């Protein structure tokens, strides 16, 4: 059996949530260096990562409880997000560190019904540990060694 979205568990810090959809994207602004218009290597660029979770009302309530305990949504401390899936053939673990959430689409009411209400929760990765894929960091150790938090 191969991995599908149904195989993933998602942890926000120590809260396990069931997501309807989830995404994580890395922006790496490294570029090709050129001399007289001819490629001659590359230069490192800045990096960023962000994503979005879509959750139903009961899973939104779990996250809302954490916000309530923090005193406000914007008072929540950044947390690590882990996406993990395993089947008999495949395994994938993606970790995003120091994620800070923002709320987006918190209401999308359709009086006809027929679909569960979903809440969209965008997040940005804010920690120098950045992203690890199957335990392998995206950034080289020397890129983050002098960053003080």
Image (spheres, rainbow, N blue to C red):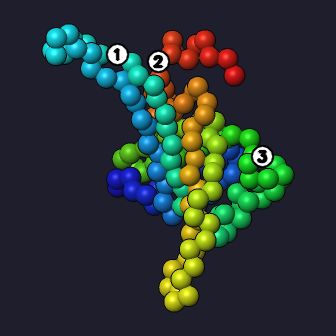
Image quarter for residue 128?
top right
- The disc placed on residue 75 is 3
The Cα–Cα distance between marks 3 and 2, rounded to whole angstroms, is 31 Å
- Circle 2 SS class: loop
Choose between 32 and 3: the one closer to the eye. 32
Q: Residues within 10 Å of mark 2 (few under 14, many from 20)?
A: few
Q: At 50% across and 47% down in the image, what residue appears?
A: 51
Residue 10 point in image, percent of width and height:
57, 51
Which residue is identified by label 1?
43
Tell whether 20 sits left or right of 1: right
Q: Residues within 10 Å of mark 1 (few under 14, many from 20)?
A: few
The Cα–Cα distance between marks 1 and 2, rounded to whole angstroms, is 14 Å
The mark lying in front, picked from 3 and 2, is: 3
The N terminus appears in which quarter of the rendering?
A: bottom left
Q: Residues within 10 Å of mark 3 (few under 14, many from 20)?
A: few
Q: At 38% across and 28% down in the image, what residue appears?
A: 29
Q: At 79% across and 53% down in the image, what residue appears?
A: 72
Which residue is identified by label 2?
140
């Amino acid at each position: 059996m191969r991995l599908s979205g149904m195989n993933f568990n998602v942890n926000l810090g120590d809260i396990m949530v069931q997501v309807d959809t989830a995404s994580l994207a890395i922006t790496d602004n490294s570029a090709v260096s050129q001399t007289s218009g001819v490629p001659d290597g590359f230069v490192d660029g800045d990096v960023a990562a962000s994503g979005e979770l879509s959750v139903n009302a009961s899973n939104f309530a779990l996250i809302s409880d954490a916000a309530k305990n923090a005193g406000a949504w914007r008072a929540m401390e950044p947390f690590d997000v882990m996406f993990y899936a395993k089947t008999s053939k495949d395994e994938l673990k993606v970790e995003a560190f120091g994620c800070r959430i923002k709320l987006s689409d918190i209401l999308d009411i359709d009086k006809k019904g027929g679909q569960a209400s979903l809440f969209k929760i965008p997040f940005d990765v804010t920690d120098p540990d950045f992203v690890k894929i199957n335990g392998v960091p995206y950034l080289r150790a020397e890129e983050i060694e002098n960053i003080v938090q």
